[in-house]
Amino acid sequence: MKHAIYQMDIIAGDPEANRQKVERWIRQTMQEEQPDIIVLPEMWTTSYTLAQLETIADVDGEPTTSFLKDMAATYSINIIGGSFANKKPDGIYNSGIVIDAHGNVIHEYDKIHLVPMLDEPRYLTGGKEKVQVFELDGVKMGLIICYDLRFPELARSLALKDVQILYVVAEWPSARKEHWKALQVARAIENQMYVVSSNRTGSYQESDFAGASMVIDPWGNALKTGNEVAEETIIEVLSLESVPQIRKDVPVFSSRIPELYD
């Protein structure tokens, strides 16, 4: 299963310019690489222009959802659509989306954990639904967003439902870049799953972003790690047969004794 990850430098506060940028990237990537799945970063339409979101956020998922559906159908590509600022009747959410190669929305997720260090709780509403499993091409997958990575319960709950690939879309800052790398490796090892991440690069106001988008195998080996400062496309093919084999060789899940855990 061939992946193309867009480690993107986001144009702050300009959703239309970012959609045009993503469209150009998809067109070029499909011509050059023909991946099965493409992955976008967190808040790629606006970046963390939180004070402007009231006027520039999508409304009930539009126009970004229609844009991604059109891209998926046009290029017959599965899209892990990162996340975008999404105004709903009860607040503005950080909404993730997954589109299949026919242009169908198959999964939506609102970021549960809001980042105090970036002032998210002041402007955004936290998601109210649990993380859920979705499937692309018969493979069970899960999606979390940035700060969610610090909460191992989310990844474990997905692993217990046989998820083989965990996607992490982010705008993770350089100030905590070593946490970014270590936590992804930990989630991969403890859950014996692939972890595939798309983190933005560049900067906005006082924050520099860490890049270092990653593909980590179920042993915790970093198969690919992106540049920490430059925009780039990361290509990797996942060998999914390794997931059940590793879970058989080191039977973590059958060794669990959850009744003894608080």
Image (cartoon, rainbow, N blue to C red):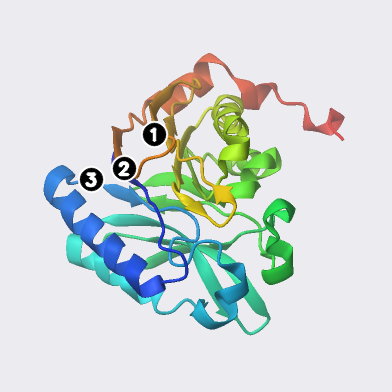
Looking at the image, which is closer to me, 52 or 247? Answer: 52
Q: Secondary structure beneath disc 1?
A: loop
Residue 90 horizontal/vertical position (percent) = 68, 81
| Mark 1 residue type | Asn
**In which quadrant is the N terminus drawn?**
top left
User: Image quadrant of residue 159?
Assistant: top right
Q: Of the residues under marks 2 and 1, which one precedes in the sequence?
A: 1
User: CB atoms at circles 1 and 3 under 8 Å apart?
Assistant: no
Label of residue 35 in the image:
3
Residue 102: tell me if it is visible: no
Q: Is residue 165 left or right of residue 16?
A: right
Residue 153 horizontal/vertical position (percent) = 70, 41
Cα–Cα span, label 1 and label 3: 20 Å
Q: Is residue 5 left or right of residue 140?
A: left
Label of residue 89 in the image:
none
Task: Give the residue drawn at x 58%, y 50%.
Answer: 207
Q: Residues within 10 Å of mark 3 (few under 14, many from 20)?
A: many
Label of residue 227 in the image:
1
Q: Secondary structure beneath disc 2?
A: strand
